Image (cartoon, helix red, strand yellow):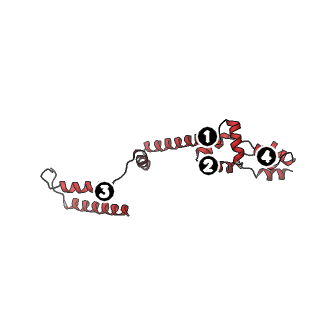
């Protein structure tokens, strides 16, 4: 008898069906589908799945529950629709992600600083503007307004190399 119960119990994914319901199935008092409808739902766990970005169908599949049953149980047990419950949890998950990204950036993660600068602040690296700045620097050397001495040959090589790299990058981004 224990072997049959264990094999039936293995069909259920977490959270597991209770032993009382399992006994009722084994004794023929309820069907397997009726048992699924009675399976306890851990709404905190469902909320975590939604916070992680799971769809309603994904959460139901993970819990081995019919979405129709979950919709009805959510309205009965939480006094809200499953869609509204999911949207609330998705919003919380998004907030937690943003907070963690911000903390990483403030902790010195350069990649995260750049990414947040681009996505939140609209910052970009303008290759064309960088190229024009290099050209302006070169033009200013040797003019009467310049207080700097003329560029050395080493400086000229560096500027030429920077222009080549900038030009190559600009050409690649236009393709």
Query: Relative to residue 71, is residue 125 depicted above or below?
Result: below
Q: Residues within 10 Å of mark 1 (few under 14, many from 20)?
A: few
Q: Which residue is mark 4?
A: 35
Q: Earlier in the sequence, mark 1 or mark 2?
A: 2
For the residues labelled 3 and 2, the Cα–Cα distance comes to 43 Å
Secondary element type, mark 3: helix
Dot in front, 4 or 1 = 1
Which of marks 3 and 4 precedes in the sequence?
4
The residue where tag 3 is placed is 128
Q: Is residue 17 visible?
A: no
Spot occupied by residue 50 in the image (x, y as percentages of width and height):
61, 45
Residue mark closest to the camera, 1 vs 3: 1
The residue beneath circle 2 is 55
Q: Residue at (70%, 36%) from the top-left corner?
A: 77
In-image side of 90 versus 149 (left or right): right
- The numbered mark, 4 or 1, whose residue comes first in the sequence reads 4
Quadrant housing residue 88:
top right
Q: Secondary structure at mark 1?
A: helix
Mark 3 crowd level (few <14, some 14–19, many ≥20, 10 Å Cα): few
The residue that mark 1 highlights is 84
Q: Nearer the viewer, residue 153 or 92?
A: 92
Residue 26 visible here? yes
Position of the C terminus, as image quadrant, is bottom left
Residue 36 in the image: state x and y as whole percent: 76, 47
Q: Are marks 1 and 3 in contact (CB under 8 Å)?
A: no
């Amino acid at each position: 008898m224990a072997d049959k119960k264990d094999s039936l119990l293995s069909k259920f994914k977490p959270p597991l069906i209770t032993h009382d319901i399992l006994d009722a199935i084994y004794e023929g008092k309820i069907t397997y589908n009726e048992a699924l409808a009675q399976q306890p739902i851990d709404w905190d766990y469902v909320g975590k799945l939604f916070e992680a970005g799971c769809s309603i169908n994904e959460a139901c599949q993970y819990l081995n529950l019919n979405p129709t049953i979950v919709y009805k149980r959510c309205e009965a047990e939480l006094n809200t629709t499953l869609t509204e419950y999911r949207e609330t949890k998705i919003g919380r998950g998004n907030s937690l992600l943003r907070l963690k990204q911000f903390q990483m950036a403030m902790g010195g993660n350069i990649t995260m600083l750049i990414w947040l600068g681009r996505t939140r602040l609209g910052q970009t690296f303008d290759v064309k503007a960088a190229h024009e700045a290099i050209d302006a620097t070169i033009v200013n050397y040797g003019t009467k307004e310049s207080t700097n001495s003329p560029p050395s040959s080493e400086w000229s090589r560096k500027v030429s190399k920077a222009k080549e790299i900038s030009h190559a990058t600009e050409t690649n981004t236009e393709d």
